[in-house]
Amino acid sequence: MKPLKIGITGVRGVVGETFTPEVVVAFSQAFGTYLDRGRILVCRDTRPSGPMVRAAVFAGLLAAGCEVIDLGVCPTPSLQLAITRLNADGGIAITAGHNPSQWNALKFVRSDGLYLNQMQGEELLDVFHQGEFAKATWDEIKRAIQYEDPIEHHLEVLRRAFDVAMIRTRQFKVAVDCCNGACSRLIPRWLEELGCEVLAVNDDPSAAFPHRPEPTPETMAQLKAVVKAGHADIGFAHDADGERLGIATESGEPLSEELTLAFASWIRFKEKPGIVVTNVSTTSTVDLIAARYGGSVVRTPVGQAYISEAMSEQNAILGGEGSGGVTVPEVHLTHDSAAAVGLILEGLARTGERASAVAKQLPQLWMLKHNVPVEPNRLYSVLQNFRGAIEREHLEHDLTDGIKVILPEGWIHVRASNTESMIRVIVEAEEAATARDLLDWARDRLKK
Amino acid sequence: MRAIPTLKISISGVRGVIGESLTPTLLTRFAQAFGTYVGSGAIVIGRDPRTSGEMVKQAVVAGLLSTGCRVIDIGMCPVPTVQLLVRHRGAQGGIAITASHNPAEWNALKFVGPDGLFLDAGQARELLDIYHQGQYTRVTDADMRGVEETSGATDLHIRAILEALGPLPHRDKRLRVVIDACNGAGSLVGPKLLAALGAEVIAINATPNGLFPRPAEPLAENLGDLCAAVSEHQADVGFAQDMDADRLAIVSERGVPIGEDQTLVLATTYVLGKQPGPVVANLATTSALEYVAKRFACSLFLSKIGEVNVTEIMQRENAVIGGEGNGGVIYPRVNFARDSLVGMALVLHHLSQSGQTITECVNSFPRFSMIKEKLACPSDKIAVVLRMISREYANYPIDARDGIKVILPEGWFLVRGSNTEPIIRVVAESEEEAKARDIVANVYARVQACINS
């Protein structure tokens, strides 16, 4: 099956196969229609298909009667911050985030700078499927696209959110891998403002991705080497559009992406008590840290929009997901790797701890992830059968998103993927052997 | 019959109304078809200042990039500048975004081949076949190219004209010129060229904002502002361009439009005086051109209507000048394209060299009166009308290459279906205006009766 995924988080596909100019034009017309014209910001990451997709987005938005402001290449959170400042009605970020280079996607942002929520995403899809778009006539259509660079403003917001003077006194040496993505334009500058000595690799936005733009230990080999050779205090790895962050300690040890939020939570809870919001799939390390410092954790379905909304309701002190996305509410209510970098360096400066020492204080759990390919038309019946089995066995479970089974020795989370035709199974336990047992147990029941 | 659609897909390109038929999806598909047709490579794009120009351009860019083309965006410019740049940059082709003389709500794509000429009928049909088949080249990741935005294209065009013709010879008093650019693609480059030639320039309607200060066709009835400005400033000549700056009409020093069919006659007079050689025009061009060619003992070839038909014969015959009676002058030493900029340069050189006024120039060759009419005609009736004409005028010489042209003892007339609108055009010419009117009235009545029957 050719991958084109049209879902509530946006539209995503492989350029040259399913992600055609026509699809992009139609989605942009639908978004322009959905927002009843208005002012729309557009940005992109550094993929080679960016200029093509951008032109198609412009054409669709202009045809629908929108006023378009192009922010050029910048992190998605830079666009999200620019929305309120520029009094825009919405935004489209052209980025497939952590997907490989041949993918691209549109992510839709609303007038408060947050992603469309489930309901809004479904409304947009209805407009798309109905196919009757607003059409501006010659005297309504906007004649030109305006240009604006959002990076300065993003830096300004970051400066206000953190104790820059204190961080500067530490004169950190920081290694950073921007994957030649949109962060190349923001992160090295932000680190310099924080008084860091910056050892940057892959910070050329005109070059190709040197590796998969997903900050996991598997993609951090180069970062690890730079940290060690340069005797850096810490290393940061970024995805293509500035949402996810990976950490390598000064000893060169790359941390699992699951631990980025745990690391940030440790810093936050050391500072003040409060609520951390994360999704049901993310490591329980966060709960153990919260328990140690008298904080608490609120769990949502998987997806940034849920985290943002719950953080706002709960007045949370931090949010994030196991993918490496961290939300710092003093900056804004959306994942922002630059904000995560600020929070972590501020925490290291305040506590005087080394990165490896913080990592050692994070409770160690064993997480296993497994994908079960299922035909698209059977995805939900397989999940229903699994749920039936759990209910018959009277096991404690949580239906926030898919089925999360809570057992004394650990947990099992089973859900349909948002982006591929498969069921994702995640288990976590204190011991490796237990985790393996839990996974076998889940796979067994999924087969039935 | 159902309502007549506003979308016109033809061998002259694709044309439609913004907010109605000319959607971004249609445009991006056409650009994909073109990218597929010419093969991945550099494509030059330029546009006129219509309000929809940016939208159309972005749809075109998306389509071209998706087929692996590299886009050279030369911005707002006359159509002939796109054609010039295709050759200058050795590009695979070009797309000019303009609906030329159509009103503001229209826009269109015109396709240019690697030789800088518009696609001819055969090539255009091949492009349409690819468009309709819908199997476009699609490149992935590493084969994607980007957009090069360049701003020097119109300056290059001006330099090319100056190199071919030189500045105006020095006179005691500089020629004073009023130019009416219709707020079109020639708004900036026209006055710049005239100044570079050494003329004194007064520009009106020279704000390229896509708002039409007058109907875009440089017909006499649309040139009131220009006539008044020429009189007010006591100028030697007034020039009127259309929206995409390929056509040129002239207003005399007395503030009177001389008729757009005279533009080519004046330009040809200058060129043949310098460099005798074959002349090519379409078969609806004034007989005054034939007179001028004879005066210089040069041959005149008549082609079907349409720029590409003229340029094809110009290349075959190695012509020194050519064009169309609608004010389109083609001067191959600069460009195989209808070009109002070249037209202005040639006419000013002629004035400067001859020392004559526009009125004196026009009076130096016999005046013909050309009368043009059009009437709405359903597409299924056009062939019926043409058959009727060739039957009823079977006793006269007939040229049936493009519509039906009939040579009468007192002049000629042409009946032809439009390529771009569902109408029939009737054109007649005679040495006397009354006779031309008689011919048109007679033919018009027959056509009307035939349509209604």
Image (cartoon, coloured by chain):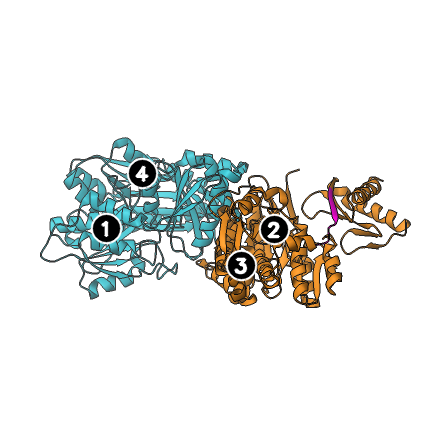
Chain colours: A orange, B cyan
| Residue numbers of the magenta segment | A362-370
Label 3 crowd bin: few (<14), some (14–19), many (20+), radius 10 Å: many
Pointer 2: residues within 10 angstroms few (<14), some, or many (20+)?
many
Determine whether A337 is above or below A162 in the image: above
Q: CA distance from mark 3 to mark 2?
A: 21 Å
In the shown orientation, is residue A203 left or right of residue B352? Answer: right
Q: Quadrant of the N terminus of chain A?
A: top right
The residue carrying mark 2 is A247
Can you give x and y, in whole percent of width and height, for residue B9 in the image?
47, 44
Residue A82 seen in this snapshot: no
Instruction: Give the CA distance from mark 2 to mark 1.
Output: 67 Å
Q: Chain of mark 3?
A: A
The picture quadrant where one finds residue B212 is bottom left
Q: Chain of mark 2?
A: A
Tell if the residue under mark 4 belongs to the same chain as the one under mark 2: no
Is the same chain shared between marks 4 and 3? no
Q: Residue B405: horizontal and vertical position, in percent?
A: 33, 39
Which comes before the other along the chain, label 1 or label 4? 4
Give residue A78's mark: 3
Q: Which residue is mark 1?
A: B344
Q: Nearer the viewer, residue B347 or B424?
A: B347
Residue B378 or residue A361, whichever sits in front: A361
Which structural element holds mark 3?
A: helix
In this view, the mark in front (4 or 3): 3
Q: Which amino acid type is marked by label 4?
A: Val
Q: Quick check: marks 2 and 1 in contact, CB under 8 Å?
A: no
| Separation (CA) of disc 4 from disc 3 | 54 Å
